Image (tube, coloured by chain):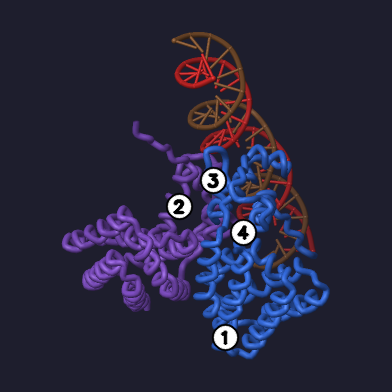
Chain colours: A purple, B blue, C brown, D red
Amino acid sequence: MIEHKTISLADQVFEHLETDILSGKYSKGEALTESKLCAELGVSRTPIREALRRLEQEHLIEEAPKGMVVVGIGKKDLADIFEIRAALEGKAAEMAAENYNDEQLSIVREALEFQEFYLGKQDPDRIKSMDSRFHETIYKMSGSVVFYDVLMPLHKKILKYRKASVSDSSRAAASVAEHRAIYEAIASHNGELASRLIVEHLNNAYSHISKGEN
Amino acid sequence: MIEHKTISLADQVFEHLETDILSGKYSKGEALTESKLCAELGVSRTPIREALRRLEQEHLIEEAPKGMVVVGIGKKDLADIFEIRAALEGKAAEMAAENYNDEQLSIVREALEFQEFYLGKQDPDRIKSMDSRFHETIYKMSGSVVFYDVLMPLHKKILKYRKASVSDSSRAAASVAEHRAIYEAIASHNGELASRLIVEHLNNAYSHISKGEN
DNA sequence: CATTGTATTATTGTATACAATTATACGGCT
DNA sequence: AGCCGTATAATTGTATACAATAATACAATG
């Protein structure tokens, strides 16, 4: 029998709002009142409130005179996020190279191969989504929930900006090539190399993103 | 007229539970059912649920077959937390040395002076609480909400372990002396020195804590 | 025309009712 | 005694009702 876990409305609302905020559908400062969301999503206030509390905890929204407003992610935040990622992801990759299991490695390899495939098809959205899976799985492979909990939200928060990267086909191609090198290093348990490559990868990504943002 | 902001029950419940979990009053694996908390705290389920969602988001509790259970912070987590703090707090201190305003600096100085005072009085609890204020204010002084949002939860999560540090009077004295040196470096805008000192401070703290944990 | 006071509305905070699910206890059966 | 099935209880998920607060609109007044 296949378990068909039903996802609670509260979780669905949370994911929906999180996606919309991170993807930039709701722009900075936009007001979210409970009643409006109830009408929009067709659920009662209880699950809405729980989702809002979680989003607030993630610092994606904050209290305002009237309801909650979306907290934007500016250039300064972007710089800080990349600085922190550069400081931590190398170590995470190193740990991943030591601790990964085969199932996790195949997920990374799959994500990589999909990226290579979609690169030919010029499909930025899928490249982006596989980029998420690639990095997130490496966080998991580190075996550290602490690293995961720190890096995962940071990675999510730049979603909006990654769109630009994957749409530039020359940067997208370079990025995927970098992913392949990182993958090879991890797969061959070369943590030191994986670490160096991922830091380079992040620096390249940030250079590209911040160039576009001027 | 002084604004007397009333804190919602939901917030109070959250803070209460967070404190109890972080201080170790609830031990790892302990079950938290909504009804039990309702009875204990004398409020309805709505604020309880909101608090639980926030705690879950902070990864302090997680779902279990029956209710939520407290997630423990083990030695591995402790090591990871100190590794991340060592990688980031130096930079945060550097930014603090550049960006601080006078009000923030006085808070740090006050926290430091209280620590020096309570050191003589042998009052570990107050030393510990001033230790929190000292570090937290430095995070704020960095001017980066990203750094703050990353470091603050990490610092909170080791509360239980800091108790041991401040109770050992020789380590407590050394820790406060290190704080003074860090304070002086920041106050004199010497970011490079502040960074080096805070990394040393963290290494010392971790050495002491992990020694006691064996 | 600006301002202030008031009425109205909108919004949140909290409690509670109800449904659905899941764990648990208990009794009968082999 | 051990096991299965059913009834019971406990627990969560969701909706809604009600109260309190805060925002807004608007009219009266100087």
Q: Disc 4 on helix, strand or loop? A: loop
Q: In which quarter of the image is residue B31?
A: top right
**What amino acid is at disc 4?**
Pro
Q: Distance between the residues labelled 1 and 4?
A: 32 Å
User: Is disc 3 in contact with disc 2, using a CB cutoff of under 8 Å?
Assistant: no
Q: How far apart are marks 3 and 4 (CA)?
A: 15 Å
Say whether mark 4 and mark 3 are on the same chain: yes
User: Which type of secondary structure does the marked residue at label 2 adopt?
Assistant: helix
Chain letter for mark 3, please: A
Let me know if marks 3 and 1 both belong to one chain.
no
Residue A177 place in picture, x, y as percent:
23, 70
Viewer-closest of A6 and B28: B28
Answer yes or no: are tags 2 and 4 on the same subunit: yes
Residue B154 in the figure: left or right of residue A140: right
Q: Residue at x 54, y 45 (%)?
A: A35
Q: In which quarter of the image is the C terminus of chain A?
A: bottom left
Q: Check disc 2 and give the amino acid type.
A: Leu
Residue of label 1: B98
Q: Determine which residue is flagged by label 2.
A: A17
Question: Which circle's residue, 3 or 4, is located before the other in the chain?
Answer: 3
Lateral position of residue B184 relative to residue C18, left or right: right
| x 38%, y 35%: residue | A3
Neighbour tally class for label 1: few under 14, some 14-19, many 20 plus, Cα within 10 Å? some
Q: Mark 2 lies on which chain?
A: A
Q: Tell me if A93 is positioned left or right of A116 in this view.
A: right
